[in-house]
Amino acid sequence: MMRQYELVERVNRYNPNADEALLNKAYVYAMQKHGHQRRASGDPYFSHPLEVAAILTDLRLDDATIAVALLHDTIEDTDATRAEIDKLFGEEIGKLVDGLTKISRLDLVSRKAKQAENFRKLLLAIADDVRVLLVKLADRLHNMRTLEHMPEHKRGRIAEETMEIYAPLAGRMGMHDLREELEDISFKTLNPDAYETIAERLHGLRERNAGLITDIENTLTERLAERGMAAVVRGREKRPYSIFRKMQQKSLGFEQLSDIYGFRVTVGTVEACYRVLGVIHTTWPTVPGRFKDYISTPKQNDYRSIHTTIVGPSRQRVELQIRTISMDRVAEYGIAAHALYKDGETGGRDISQHTEDCRAYDWLRRTIDLLSEGDTPEEFLENTKLELFHDQVFCFSPKGRLIALPRGATPIDFAYAVHTDIGNTCVGSKINGKIMPLVTELRNGDEVEIIRSPAQTPPPAWEAIAVTGKARAAIRRATRESVRKQYGALGEHILKRAFARADKTYSEDLLEAALNDHAQASVAELLASVGRGNISAQSVLKSAHPDYQDERAAPAQTTNEEGWFGLEKGAGLKFRIPNAAQAAATSADPNEPGETGFGPALPIRGLTGDIPVSFAPDGGAVPGDRIVGILTPSEGLTIYPIQSPALKEFDDQTERWVDVRWDIDVNNPERFPARLSISAVNEPGSLATIAQIIGENSGNIDNVKMVRKAPDFHEMVIDLEVWDLKHLNRIINQLRSKPNVSSVTRVNG
């Protein structure tokens, strides 16, 4: 176990001005508090915080962080209190220790809802001060190194939590060495057979290529020295989990991997990096498609390096990473490298003072911003995990702005990465000057231009296409808002019509008085609930006007009134009949087709209007039909032609009937669904003749179903889309004129 003076010496090596008194006091206090406590391995418990502190000294962190590492388990596992630590070590250290105590109590592999909420708490804790995360990662690393001493039933849970949460977080913070060690130990615990298999293959490869790394290191160093380049070349072997992940992702065998051995070339300046690259590429042949320049376009976690693969000595493929000393520090320590000293500065520096311009910390802040976007904890967890595990691609806007996105991202993700409004109004994209589908997967270096329309709203299907959490969250919000507005518009129409029928005043002030009775937070929510059919218009009317009494006459059979077609009950209802209603229009506005006795009829254009509309499932409706709307709870309006037999099911449900009318935009024609039942002669070419007539008349066949097939005739049902009733009748008449067509009838469900 490391002694007190040894810890202070480790800190003094990189920080000669370390606060030795603080370190000594924290060491003694933690040792006394943990007393005779033992770990599962039998070692004194104090050895754990001491090892955590040692890991952080390797990262060269400030004195306060080292003190927090020594104290991080005192509140949780001893009788120490937050107030006591605040008094002895200051509120800053007390706050950090308290934050770590709260994190240690989070279960991040429990059922999904609880896991998601705990993950949010974790990110909120580390967002306030990144030192909380650094101490927690060091704590988790030491626990993983001693995982074999834990009971077997706990190992899997700890390893799973590490693989899912802490290792990816370390990677996002740029701490690649720490991430790889966490992943490797977790992999060995969760999949021991695969780990042993890869370890054996590596051992065999190591024996066959004894001295290979040393030979390549020497050869590269000599070649660079010949060109006057002073560089340090270090070789390393890939870890088993890194190999396993690449084999899984690329569907490769072990023998097909070209970068089991990698080499880092470290030089003094950025200019020297490119000179080294020139020397290497003019000395050995390169492997096409294996060059990446992360110096000109750094990763979001601040990683900067040049990657290239060559066919080196002994015809062995060699992956090279070329970087400066400072870049190498960032690659090794990640966000912790911001606590290192620059330009000859001395003295301990608080890492929290160096993270404001850190790109890795930017990702964390953006992720925290998603917490306020209204997603459920489960959605937040899912989207954040997606971004944690994805590699990146770098794309450019037409003005040259660099946008980093997860691998697999589409122009939709790009649009939302630029700005939410750009994503919401996106209708198309140009990639490298060429119009491409929005589902196109972006590649490194693509220039992406987003085509926009102010009338666009993102369709819900985009959520399945988007990769980034920001895009998915924005699409969900826009979809919810669009649906809410649609139901709100429908609810407003229904209420206005109900108030007009009752000869009562309608106003938003009256609706506000009804909010408490219906447990609604706002008028907009009340209208949407009425539109969904969850709240009846009559109940809102009674809440707004407590003196209202429903005095409608009892239903009476009406068979000769215009527009009823024999429906048994319909008192108080009136349906618009095209032309007849327009002739009786009383509206002062020449563009308004008129009103019924109970307020304006709801205009119907199609499926893309301002209200949630669908058409009768068996037969549909087309402009020219006399139509009626039936309100279906949580689904909106279903439009039926007035002759549909299905309407008899609703003739005693007066609250569900809504007066509707066609409102077709001649400048933007839209097709509508209709269904035909056709009996045709069973001979070759009959179906082709039918399809040809429909096609020649600009009809669109949506579905064909063979209902009955006999030796002489067969019957089929065809769902098609037409412009209006006149268009449909023209198709029906031409079909009937063909000699191989026996009968054509329109189906009304």
Image: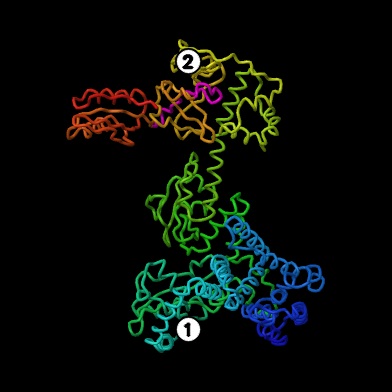
* Residue in the image at 36% along x and 23% along y: 725
N-term mark: 2 or 1: 1
Looking at the rendered structure, the kind of residue marked 2 is Ala
* Residue 665: in magenta span: yes
User: Mark 2 near mark 1, Cβ–Cβ under 8 Å?
Assistant: no
Range of magenta residues: 650-670
Residue lying at the far top of the rendered structure: 560
Tell me the number on the disc at residue 269.
none
- The relative height of residue 505 versus residue 478 in the rendered view (above or below) is above
- The relative height of residue 617 versus residue 195 in the rendered view (above or below) is above
In this rendering, would 690 be left or right of 110? left
Is residue 169 visible in this depiction of the protein? no
Is residue 679 visible in this depiction of the protein? yes
- Quarter of image, res 531: top right
Residue lying at the far left of the rendered structure: 684
**Of residues 296 and 716, which is closer to you in this image?**
716
- Residue identifier under label 1: 234
Residue 723 is situated, as x and y percent measured from the top left of the image, at 36, 28
- Residue identifier under label 2: 581
Secondary structure of the residue carrying tag 2 is helix
Specify few, some or many for label 2: CA neighbours under 10 Å numbering under 14, 14-19, or 20 or more: some
**Of residues 236 and 272, which is closer to you in this image?**
236
What's the CA distance linking mark 2 and mark 1?
87 Å
- Quarter of image, res 733: top left
* Residue in the image at 48% along x and 69% along y: 294
Where's the N terminus, which quadrant? bottom right
Residue 624 is situated, as x and y percent measured from the top left of the image, at 40, 22
In this rendering, would 271 be left or right of 705? right
In this rendering, would 317 be left or right of 590? left
Looking at the rendered structure, the kind of residue marked 1 is Arg
Residue 724 is situated, as x and y percent measured from the top left of the image, at 37, 26
